Amino acid sequence: MKNEFIYQIFPQTFCEVGSKRGIGNIKGIISKLDYLKALGITRIWISPLTKSPFKDSGYDVSDYYNINNMFGNMDDFEQLIIESKKRELSIIIDIVFNHTSNQHNWFKKALLGDKKYLNYYIFKDPVNGKEPTNWKSKMGGSVWEYVPKLNKYYLHLFEKSQPDLNWKNEVLRKELINILKFWRDKGVDGFRLDVCNLYSKPKDYKDDEIGDGRRFYTDGEELENYLKYLNYEVFCRDKNIFTVGEVSSTTKEKSFNYAKNNNNELDCIFTFLHLKVDYFNNYKWTYMKPDLLQFWNMQKEWQLYFQENDSNLALFMNNHDQPRAISRFGNDKSYHYESATSIFGFISLMRGIPFIYQGEEIGMTNMHFDNLDDFKDVETIGNAEELKNTINNNDLLNILRSKSRDNARSVMQWSSDKYAGFTEADNINLHINKNYININVDKQKNNTKSVLYFYKKLIDIRTKDPIFVDGKIEFFKEQNFAYKRMLDYREILVLTNWTSCKENIKLKLKLNEWKVVLNNYSSINNKVLEPYQLIVLERI
Ligand code: GLC
């Protein structure tokens, strides 16, 4: 389980084969398994493939047991399992259990007043004729939606089409277990639990006078019991099942238990504080350059804390919810290759389980959006709607350009053919980055100076060497953006510069004592790092 390198696929924009509908599909994923195998990854996490009205790109499930027909059918999925097993790749599916779609039969029945299903969700009476609390939804607006026929509000932490499930209800929990077993029995080897630290809701619902309400429902009281329950019923029954939980707005003290070894909850967790260093006062929809020092201090803190507590972090800089890290933390124009490789190398050699997101391995960048109407993502649109009241359109456009999830959801750039070789359809209704002509898999696959080549090399090194799994991590007082991994008598030094200027090396580095494992420049100087240089050295 330990020597993992995981690749995330966002199915709608990954690859389409056969159907010519202009949307990625399962056959497309199958057609790229050899590519993924050659990249060296061990598991593939696929964002939701299940039936959904697609308000939130599949994170609004209307039927947990069936495949969304825009992606194909169950035969295709079974074929995917067979073909991936042939290549010793395992499949992790996304499990969205904090909420369903409002199109799910459970919710439809609840709206008809069926008591059983009312209790699957969180319905509350109005308080003084209004919403039960003043909490704000992550998609903009209130977290409560009124249903006149029932004279009740239901809770939706995300969009109003995503009603939250009531985990207190044991009957519901059993349904959820059955869903997990269904997919496990289909041959799925892992689960990514979407926003799982929001499952446990509070006993009392009260107004939040100082925030948006999240402190009342994040990392709730019963959460660890729920995770242990899932683990006991499903995860621990098969030693190959891999689990990663998405844990939003948490602290290290609250979250380490979820992925502590032998704690019978999860294998690792995604946390996000390191990707909030360009939020102003913890608020996403602002324009700010990332605070690199804060980023670095956060990495150190979390790494050491998880090491001390024998717990596991997922290592990542990109996913379908984040703007592209190369555009955010790097210089995606003048230092494209250097930024892509240094960000990736530096993060994924730390202690934890590394994940990459489709397109990152070729250095795909943020989109360039010209107009406010260009955005498609529900979170972007919902928040823009609110922001419009307080800021002018120019500022709004700048904020959305830098923060929108649409940045990461443009089609995968396979070649310089029409639509980046992503589909053979005549038309597509997806974002496509104009730079696909220059940045694509075809161009990079035989080029030893390419981002793709560097990713392959690093993945190979990391997955073969136990030092990156079992080795201790240590940091330096005199140097930021540097760490050591140590195992037995061995020592590896990782050092980088995440700026477009040269930077002094303050460590006393005698180059004759080290051999070069990786370097994204052609030479090394023991006094200075070049812009976005990454060096990995092993003590001789
Ligand atoms: C997670 C998903 C995100 C989705 C949200 C609601 O954060 O990664 O894409 O919108 O949960 O399900």
Image: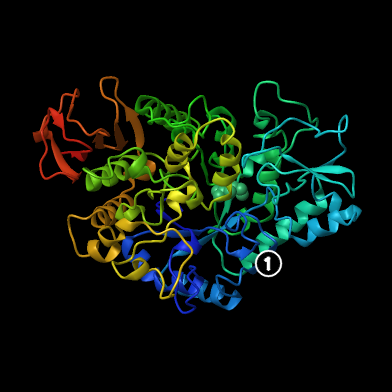
State the residue at coordinates (31%, 65%).
Answer: 38
User: Is 64 situated left or right of 301 in this image?
Assistant: right
Which image quarter: residue 352? Answer: top left
Question: Is 403 in front, or is 360?
Answer: 403
Residue 487 position in % (x across, y down)? 31, 38
User: Is 42 situated left or right of 285 in this image?
Assistant: left
Which image quarter: residue 494? Answer: top left
State the residue at coordinates (65%, 62%).
Answer: 52
Where 399 falls versus 444 (above or below)?
above
State the residue at coordinates (47%, 30%).
Answer: 279
Residue 32 position in % (x across, y down)? 39, 69
Residue 421 position in % (x across, y down)? 35, 70
Where 259 falls versus 36 (above or below)?
above
In the picture of the structure, the residue carrying the numbered disc 1 is 65
The number of discs equals 1
The amino acid beneath tag 1 is: Tyr
Which image quarter: residue 95? Answer: bottom right
Where 74 falls versus 437 (above or below)?
below
Instruction: Label 1, secondary structure: give it.
Output: strand
Q: Quadrant of the C terminus?
A: top left
Question: Is 224 in front, or is 530?
Answer: 530
User: Is 95 situated left or right of 356 in this image?
Assistant: right
